[in-house]
Amino acid sequence: MFFHYLGDGNESIGFRRRFFVPQPRRLFVGNLLILQPNHLDMGNFATYKSHYRSIITLGLPLLLGQLGMILTGFADTLMVGHYSTDALASASFVNNIMNFMTVLCMGFSYGLTPIVGARNARGEHFEVGATVKNAVLLNMAFGIAVGAAMLSIYFNVEKLGQPANLIPLIKPYYLVLLASMVPMLFVNTLRQFTDGITDTRLSMWIIIGGNILNIILNYLTIYGKMGFPELGLLGAGLSTLAARMAMAIAYAVVLSRSHRYRRYLSGIKGGRLDTATIATIFATSWPIAVQMGLETGIFSFASIMIGWLGEIPLAAYQIMLSISTIGFLVYYSLGASMSIKIAGYYGAGDIDKIKSCSVAGLHIIMLFAAIACMVFFFLGEPVIKLFTSDVAVISVALLVVPPLMLYQVGDALQVTYANALRGITDVRPMMLTAIVAYLIVGLPLGYLLGFPCGMGIVGIYLSFAVALLLAGIMFFTKFRLDLRDMQAKR
C-alpha cells in the first residue's frame, strides 16, 4: 500500500512523494498525522524509475559484497556450531561484543563518503586524495582508542556473569578478533573512498575474495584439515585476522597501481595533514559512529543479558543474529547506495532529486524487508537446523522468529533515513536519536520485558522492534524538516 506525506500546504508538489510502508490506514505520532494511504501516482513513476535503476546499479556491488559477508558469517556460525555448542555460545558472546567495535569504527568511516562524494562531483580530485589521507590517519587513531577501551572488557570478562565453562574459549578468541580490527580500519576507510567516487565494484571483489579466503581457512583450522592443527573456535578467529590482512593489502596494491585512481594519488601523496580537514571529517564521522554504535550496542549488550539465561539461549541468539544479518546488511548496502547518490545531488544543489531519490530508496528497501520476512517465515526452521542439531537450541531459536519478522519494518525505515541524513551531511541529530531510541528506550525495555516480565529472549527481541521503529520515525521527521528548510532557502 502506498502513502504520501501530508504537509502544511506550503511544500512543492515534488515533495509529496509516495512511500511504500505496510502500515494501518493512518499513522500518527502523538497528534501528528504522518502517513495516509493513496494510490500510486504513475506520473511520478518515471522519476522514481531512474532512481530505482541508479540505486540498484550502484548498490548491486555493495549488496554482493554484503552478501559475501553474510555467507561468511553463516559459514563461521555453521562450522563453529557443528564443532560444539560451547564454542557456538562463546562465539556468540565475543562476536556480539566485537560487533559493537566493528560497527562503531565502520560508522566512523562512513563520515568520509558524503565529503568525498560532494568533492568528487565538483571535480576536486586532489582535494579528494588529500581528504582520504587525513581520513586514514583519523580512522586509525579512532580505532586504536576504541580498541584500548575494549581491552577493559577482556580483563573483566569473568565479572560479566557468563557461564564459567565458556571463559577459556572466550578469552583467546576475543584477543585475536581485537587484533584483526587494525587491518579492518584501513579497509573501512579505503572502502568509503572508493564508494564515494561511485566505484563500488572494487570493494565488492576485494570483500568477496576476503570472505572466500576466510571460509577456506575456517574449514582448515577449526577442524584441523590438510595438515593444519585443530584449533576450534580459535581457528575461526585466526582465519578472520588473516582474511582482513589480505583485504587491506589488496586495497593498497590496487589503489597504488590502477590507472583509474591516478588522479587521486597526487592528493594522497602530496596532500598535507591538515587539522581543519581532520576536524571536518570528525564532525561528520562522530555522530554516525555514535548512532551506529548504539544501534549495534543494543544487540551487543543484549548478548550479555541473554548470557544470564544460559548457554542454550546464547547459542540460539548467535544463530538468529546471523540470520537477521541478511536483512540489515542488504538494507544498509542499498541505503549506502542511496546516500552516495544523495551526496552528489546535495553537492550539486539539486533538492528535487534529493527528495525523489530518498523516496525511491525507501520503496526498494521496504521491498527487501518484505522479502526478508517471507524468508524468515517460510525457511526459518530449516535454516536454523543448518547451524546446529541441538534440539534445545533449535526450540529456543524458533521462538524468536515472530519478533525477528516484526522488527524488519523499523530496521528498514531507520536505515533509509539515517542514510538520507548522511547524504546531506546532517548527522548530528542522528546521535541524539540513537541515544533516545537505543540507550534510553531500547536497552531498559529489553531488560524489563526479558526479566521482570519473564519473557526471556523473546522479550529482548521485542524491544529491538520498538527501538528501531522509534529511530526510524525520528530520522524520517528530521529529514522531512531538512527538506522543508532547503526548499525555503532556494
Image: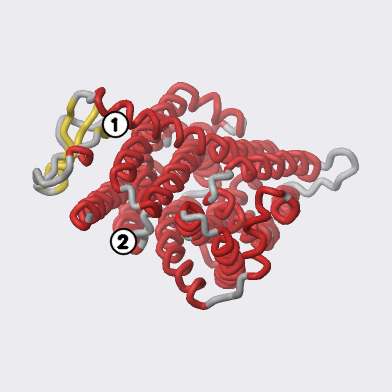
User: Is label 1 in a helix, a strand or a loop?
Assistant: strand
Residue 94: x and y in percent read 59, 55
Dot 2 amino acid type: Pro
Dot 1 amino acid type: Phe
**Residue 272: assigned label:** none
User: Is label 2 in a helix, a strand or a loop?
Assistant: helix
Would you say residue 350 is visible in this rendering?
yes
Crowd rating for badge 2 (residues with CA inside 10 Å; few <14, some 14–19, many 20+): some
Name the one closer to the observer, 357 or 475: 357
Name the one closer to the observer, 222 or 206: 206
Task: Name the residue furthest front.
Answer: 123
Residue 201: x and y in percent read 61, 40
Point 50% across, 43% down: residue: 317
> Counting residues from the N terminus, which is met first, the one under dot 1 or under dot 2?
1
In the rendered view, tell whether residue 22 sits above or below residue 32.
above
Report which residue position mark 2 lands on.
429
Report which residue position mark 1 lands on.
20
Quadrant of the rendering where the C terminus is positioned: bottom left
Color scheme of the displayed model: secondary structure
Residue 13: x and y in percent read 18, 38
In which image quadrant can residue 356 be found? top left
Residue 318: x and y in percent read 54, 44
User: Would residue 463 be found to the left or right of residue 338 on screen?
Assistant: left
Crowd rating for badge 1 (residues with CA inside 10 Å; few <14, some 14–19, many 20+): some
In which image quadrant can residue 249 be found? bottom right
User: Would residue 220 be found to the left or right of residue 457 on screen?
Assistant: right
In the rendered view, tell whether residue 446 sits above or below residue 134.
above
Point 74% across, 47% down: residue: 232
